[in-house]
Amino acid sequence: QQQVKQSPQSLIVQKGGISIINCAYENTAFDYFPWYQQFPGKGPALLIAIRPDVSEKKEGRFTISFNKSAKQFSLHIMDSQPGDSATYFCAASVYNQGGKLIFGQGTELSVKP
Amino acid sequence: DTEVTQTPKHLVMGMTNKKSLKCEQHMGHRAMYWYKQKAKKPPELMFVYSYEKLSINESVPSRFSPECPNSSLLNLHLHALQPEDSALYLCASSQLGRISGNTIYFGEGSWLTVV
């Protein structure tokens, strides 16, 4: 019940295309859903996050779509660029569990020029 | 640039050595974390400190010993490690409180190699 399932494991997109990464969860107590971007040799950087009372959040080229009834959320990267090539992790947490983040397994995104 | 600073960036230690990883944040956060990350895997939570007190220990072996000297500093003391402990060790911090308490910021990590 504590798992977050992320797909695909790897993704290759042409420059200018749309990258879509999906996550699903079971625990309805989760109340915060962040996405992290991690470049090789670096720590994860918070990209964008959403709470379950909102169905969509957009920041620049990055959009989270959230479907509470389906217990799914996804990251869309519009106009994907080679500089977006990184590993992306979705995550979920419950406020009263001390900030413990449950991560998905990660998606390795490669944007080809 | 991350506001969570970790030192050293790289550490090579023998199995009988004692070493420490250090972390510092100046965002006024009252929760600090240690995570361990293996190649191509997500970070795994090790310890959580809330208000300088250890609040979560994810059944981590005693060869890892955390310490929180004050609200800005977090250390991870390492002793008698095994080669399989080689990994990226990530420090993180967050506020406490319902609105912003879930947002966790990571440092760049310390690459540890145990030989």
Image (cartoon, grey):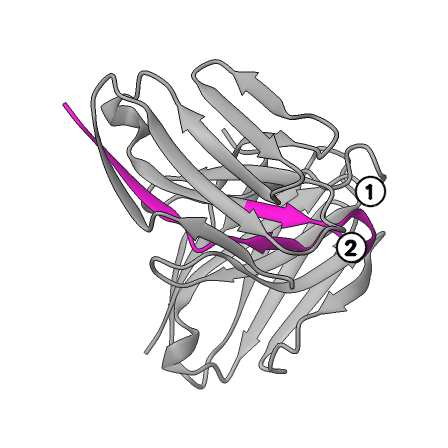
Residue position for label 1: B96
Q: Are marks 2 and 1 in contact (CB under 8 Å)?
A: no
Q: Chain of mark 2?
A: A
From what the image shows, is residue A70 above or below residue B75?
above
Q: Which residues are magenta?
A: A91-113
Residue B27 visible in the current orientation: yes
Based on the picture, tell me whether residue B43 belongs to the magenta stretch. Answer: no
Based on the picture, tell me whether residue A98 belongs to the magenta stretch. Answer: yes
Occupied quadrant, residue B26: top right
User: Could you give the CA–CA distance between mark 2 and mark 1, rounded to whole angstroms?
Assistant: 9 Å
Residue B104 visible in the current orientation: no
Q: Residue at x 32, y 23 (%)?
A: A18
Q: Residues within 10 Å of mark 1 (few under 14, many from 20)?
A: some
Percent x, y for residue A9? 33, 51
Is A52 positioned to the left or the right of A9 in the image? right
Q: Residue placed farthest to the top in the image? A: A60
Q: Nearer the viewer, residue B78 or A54?
A: A54
Is B113 positioned to the left or the right of A93 in the image? left
From what the image shows, is residue B59 above or below residue A48?
below
Residue position for label 2: A98
Q: Nearer the viewer, residue A78 or B97?
A: A78
Q: Say which amino acid is labelled 1.
A: Leu
Kind of element beneath mark 1:
loop
